Image (cartoon, grey):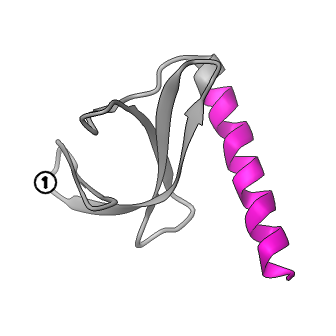
Amino acid sequence: MEKKINNILFITGQDGTQMTFKVLFTYHSERFNKDYAVFYNEQDKNHLIAYSYDENITLFPITSQEENAELEDALRQYDEEQASHSCD
């Protein structure tokens, strides 16, 4: 079960435990004409998840390898931008 409130995503696992994720960044893909959000786990900042979303902020899993590859590129670009800002 997933629920998004003000840039926070709560995911309840099958065992009933709840994980909290925050939005790391969002972006629009011209190639797929979709919007995406990348979230990080508050307890483990290396645990990232990503979804596409629509105008109602309904989240959809990413299922194609092409979309995953583009997401990896977007994450690399985000990391590079963050690194360059930390050097300023």
Q: Residues within 10 Å of mark 1 (few under 14, many from 20)?
A: few
How far from the left and from the top, in percent, is residue 47?
51, 57
Residue at the spot 19% in from the left edge and 59% down from the top edge: 17
How far from the left and from the top, in percent, is residue 19?
28, 61
Quadrant location of the C terminus in the rendered image = bottom right
In the image, residue 27 above or below residue 44: above
Report the magenta residues as a range. 68-88
Residue at the spot 52% in from the left edge and 68% down from the top edge: 45
Membership of 72 in magenta stretch = yes
Membership of 81 in magenta stretch = yes
How far from the left and from the top, in percent, is residue 81?
77, 61
Quadrant location of the N terminus in the rendered image = top left
Does residue 9 appear to the left or right of 48 in the view shown?
left
Q: Main secondary structure of the magenta part?
A: helix
In the image, residue 3 above or below residue 55: below
- For this orientation, the residue located farthest to the left is 16
**Where does label 1 land, which residue?**
16
Residue at the spot 31% in from the left edge and 33% down from the top edge: 55
